[in-house]
């Protein structure tokens, strides 16, 4: 399988967010910033901790199915008010 580009990864992440009705999706492009921690930063929100959890789960599942990429690390699933997903070149924050 060919390596997934950061753009393909962002597209898959956004599709996952939309699948669970995530709102206010913003993608920040950090490619031109020297020493940036990632190439893209994707932010969205849900209306409840249940929806935040569902959005994050769908991002992981949809991204794995469409690109083969697995999340490198996560944080925030315990209370699901804010969940962080790290895909290396792309970092995702899902907020309530």
Image (spheres, rainbow, N blue to C red):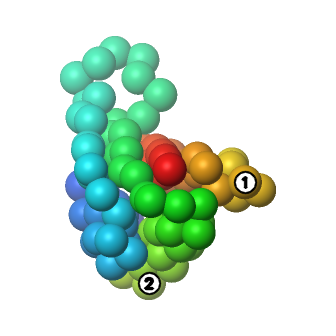
> What is the residue that sits farthest to the right in this orientation?
78
Q: Quadrant of the N terminus?
A: bottom left
Q: How far across and how far down the image is residue 85, in percent?
A: 55, 52
* Label at residue 79: 1
Mark 1 element type:
loop
Between 11 and 3, which is closer to the camera in this rendering? 11
Q: How far across and how far down the image is residue 4, in percent?
A: 35, 64
For label 2, count other residues whose C-alpha is less than 10 Å away and answer few (under 14), some (14-19) or many (20+): few
Disc 2 designates what residue?
65
Residue occupying image coordinates x 43% and y 59%: 46
> What is the residue that sits farthest to the front in this orientation?
47
Identify the mark nearer the N-term, 2 or 1: 2
* Label at residue 45: none
Any part of residue 60 in sight: no
Between 68 and 12, which is closer to the camera in this rendering? 12
Between 3 and 90, which is closer to the camera in this rendering? 90
Residue occupying image coordinates x 30% and y 57%: 23
Q: Are marks 2 and 1 in contact (CB under 8 Å)?
A: no
Residue occupying image coordinates x 22% and y 23%: 32
Residue occupying image coordinates x 61% and y 50%: 81
Any part of residue 96 in sight: yes
């Amino acid at each position: 399988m060919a390596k997934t580009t950061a753009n393909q990864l962002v597209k898959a992440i956004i599709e996952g967010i939309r699948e669970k009705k995530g709102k206010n999706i913003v993608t920040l492009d950090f490619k031109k910033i020297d020493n940036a921690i990632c190439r893209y930063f994707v932010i969205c929100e849900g209306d409840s901790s249940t929806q935040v959890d569902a959005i994050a789960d769908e991002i992981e599942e949809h991204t794995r199915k469409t690109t083969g990429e697995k999340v490198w690390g996560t944080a925030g699933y315990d209370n699901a008010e804010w969940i962080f997903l790290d895909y290396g070149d792309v970092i995702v924050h899902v907020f309530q």
